[in-house]
Image (cartoon, grey):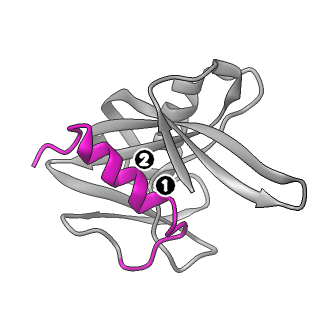
Amino acid sequence: MVNFYDEAEEHLLKFAVIFAETEGKYVFCKHKQRNTWEIPGGHREPGEDILDTAKRELYEETGAVDFDIKPICVYSVAEEGLSGSKETFGMLYYAEIRKFEKELHSGIEKIQITDQLPDEWTYPEIQPVLIKEAKKRGYRKS
């Protein structure tokens, strides 16, 4: 289950996920080891500011070198386990990308620039919900 918050304590934010667009189209990425599409994002490194995590992940996963980025909201994913529910927090960002590098430098095989949402998601219970929330909050230009 995905929940949304306006804010959270900085130390709780473990992930940065970026709802990215370029020229009014979505930007998705495909990891080399998967056959599914995902929103750019990833884990926060120790000592890293969450905004720096978002910028780093956006660059690593899409090759974006010229962009504007801003926070949308905090999200959490609740996982059920043997000892109850555990909530993991991340920050959802919006980025408008103006320029990409020609080559990708991480485990990402390719990016897709499209006006359609993918059919095959890496995290189908999470990523479409994040995009829906971003749109609800006014972060879709077209």
- Residue at x-position 49% and y-position 69%: 124
Q: Please indicate whether residue 138 sits to the left or right of residue 82 in the image.
A: left
Of the pair 36 and 61, the residue shown nearer to us: 36
Q: Residue 123: x, y in percent? A: 54, 66
Question: Vertically, is 75 above or below 73?
Answer: below
* Picture quarter with the N terminus: bottom right
Return the residue nearer the eye: 77 or 66. 77
Q: Which residue is mark 2?
A: 63
> Can you give x and y, in whole percent of width and height, for residue 85 in the image?
76, 51
Residue position marked by numbered label 1 in the rendering? 104
Pointer 2 and pointer 1: residues touching (CB < 8 Å)?
yes
Span highlighted in magenta in the image: 119-142
Q: Is residue 130 magenta?
A: yes
Q: Residue 114 is drawn in which quadrant?
A: bottom left
Give the left or right position of residue 13, taking residue 69 as reference. right
Which residue is drawn at the image coordinates 75% and 59% (left, top)? 80
Considering only vertical position in the picture, is 15 above or below 121? above
What residue occupies the far right of the structure in this picture? 83
Residue type, mark 2 in image: Gly
| Towards the viewer: 98 or 28 | 28
Q: Is residue 28 above or below residue 44?
A: below
